[in-house]
Amino acid sequence: MNEPMSLLVIVVPESLEERLVDELLLHPEWVTGFDSHEVEGHGSRLVRKSGAEQVRGRARRVRLEMVIAEQHARALLDHLKSVVPQPDVVYWMQGVADFGRFA
């Protein structure tokens, strides 16, 4: 592992899942693999669109996670912000000390 790696997490409304997954798959030069998980978002700044989400006080989201070279993460984020400019998409990056496979 020569270049700095990051854990990039992107959380999107369920309605944007396929769009974001498609964008990630279109860019193998940046993204070599990722995981997706259904999650529920909580908080006062959360956009709750459906009546059920408003009653429940939380919103269904999809969390996309990938370990990626830091420079690729920044390029990917710039790209995604330009093609999916949505205020209810959130992301964060964390440094990765090590990453590999057992075999």
Image: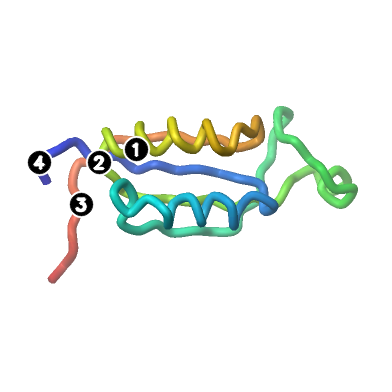
First along the sequence among labels 4 and 2: 4
Residue of label 2? 69
For mark 2, give the secondary structure. Answer: strand
Rendered image coloring scheme: rainbow
Q: Which residue, as the protein is rendered here, is positioned at the far left?
A: 2
Along the line of sight, the residue nearer the viewer: 100 or 19: 19
Evaluate if marks 4 and 2 touch, with contact meaning CB atoms under 8 Å apart.
Answer: no
Evaluate if marks 2 and 3 touch, with contact meaning CB atoms under 8 Å apart.
Answer: no
Marks 4 and 1 sit apart, C-alpha to C-alpha, by 16 Å
First along the sequence among labels 2 and 3: 2
Marks 1 and 3 sit apart, C-alpha to C-alpha, by 15 Å
Q: Nearer the viewer, mark 4 or mark 3?
A: 4
Residue of label 4? 2
Residue of label 3? 99
Along the line of sight, the residue nearer the viewer: 37 or 72: 72
Residue of label 1? 73
Image quarter of the C terminus: bottom left
Identify residue type, mark 3. Answer: Phe
Identify residue type, mark 4. Answer: Asn
Marks 1 and 2 sit apart, C-alpha to C-alpha, by 6 Å
Along the line of sight, the residue nearer the viewer: 96 or 68: 68
Vertical relation: 78 (above or below) 24? above
Label 2 neighbour load within 10 Å: few <14, some 14-19, many 20+:
many
For mark 4, give the secondary structure. Answer: loop
Evaluate if marks 4 and 3 touch, with contact meaning CB atoms under 8 Å apart.
Answer: no
Identify residue type, mark 1. Answer: Ala
Count of marks overlaid on the render: 4
Residue 57 in percent (x, y) is at 80, 43
Evaluate if marks 1 and 2 touch, with contact meaning CB atoms under 8 Å apart.
Answer: yes
Marks 4 and 2 sit apart, C-alpha to C-alpha, by 10 Å
Q: Residue at x 30, y 38 (%)?
A: 72
Label 4 neighbour load within 10 Å: few <14, some 14-19, many 20+:
few
